[in-house]
Amino acid sequence: MGFPFSNTPQTLSYRTDLIDKFPQTWDEFFVLMDKIHDPANGLYAISFPGVKEQLSGLWMMVQWSLGGRWADADWNLTIDSPETREALKIARKWFTYADPAAPAWTLAEADAAFLQGNAAVCFSWPTLAIGPNGDNPEKSKVVNKWAIAPIPYAKNGVTVLSSWDIGIPKAAKHKDAAWEWIKFYTSKEKQLKNYIDYSILPARASVWEKPEVKNSKMYPHKAASDQGAVIWWRIPAGTMAETYVRDAVANYVTDQWNLEKSVKFMENGLTKLLNDYPPAPGVKNTGR
């Protein structure tokens, strides 16, 4: 158990001088990318981290936005689905609009490409670099030319949630002092200061309504949360499950595996994990 102090839904950044209104669906998104993509003049439609550790999280975002999920509420696997296949196709299509170096990019390179004006859209965590630096002329060439938007979708807008919590270990020697610190760190005043100074998104709903937050460029994260933002499995098998997803996505987008092999690899891996590390009795799958 823990107290949340920052909940960050995955969103995207886009160039407002190139895009008037960001599309809501993936079909509309790719129509727009076709119009914008201009590598001959140094402009790629998309930047994103292509390394598999980050790409897998982006793929989850797509699969969930299409209405897909890994398993139902009772842990019956649903990963072998049309939504999974479509999400894999979408992730691979991104590479046709990206810098050829994108497969080796981390978040740092993806954000830098956007800040230097070399990409029209960036799939990343805008709170890490684009939010703090986007309007700093010493670090950005897109000052006052960018905004944040929820991801496109087909069936719904469910996206990946980065949830940061804090708690008190059972072995802590000074639990009372720890509790006082948690109260301070999760207070409305501290959450607002963290937002203003460091672009750390608040976990308190009331802080989202503060003028400093509501009138800022980062506020569209609230719309992304309202559409639906969930985290991957929070069970013992969760981290290992992500590894199977990661390898399947990476091998598919690099043409090492075909579609069916990638889907079957995920299904077989998740089946094994749920058999080896079953969720505790009564625990439901509240994520995807």
Image (cartoon, rainbow, N blue to C red):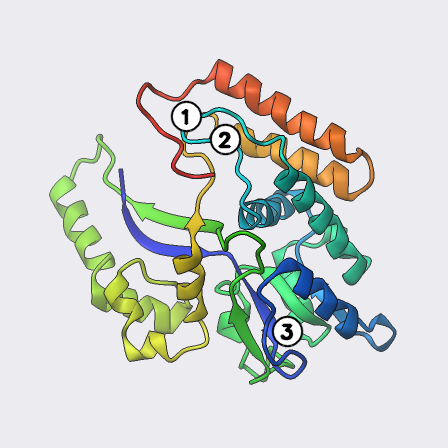
Picture disc at residue 74: 1
Q: Which residue is drawn at 70% across and 49% down?
A: 91
Name the amino acid, label 3: Leu
Picture disc at residue 115: 3
Q: Residue at x 59, y 77 (%)?
A: 21
Which quadrant holds residue 215? bottom left
Q: Counting other residues with Cα less than 10 Å from the Cα at mark 1, is it few (<14), some (14-19), or many (20 or more)?
A: few
| x, y percent for residue 274 | 49, 20
Report the Cα–Cα distance between label 1 and label 3. 43 Å
Q: Residue at x 65, y 68 (%)?
A: 121
Which of 53 and 22 lies nearest the eye of the viewer? 22
Q: Nearer the viewer, mark 3 or mark 2?
A: 2
Q: Which of marks 1 and 3 is in front?
A: 1
| x, y percent for residue 211 | 30, 79
Question: Where is mark 2, residue-wise?
Answer: 71
- Secondary structure under tag 2 reads loop
Instruction: Give above or below for 143 relative to 228.
Output: below
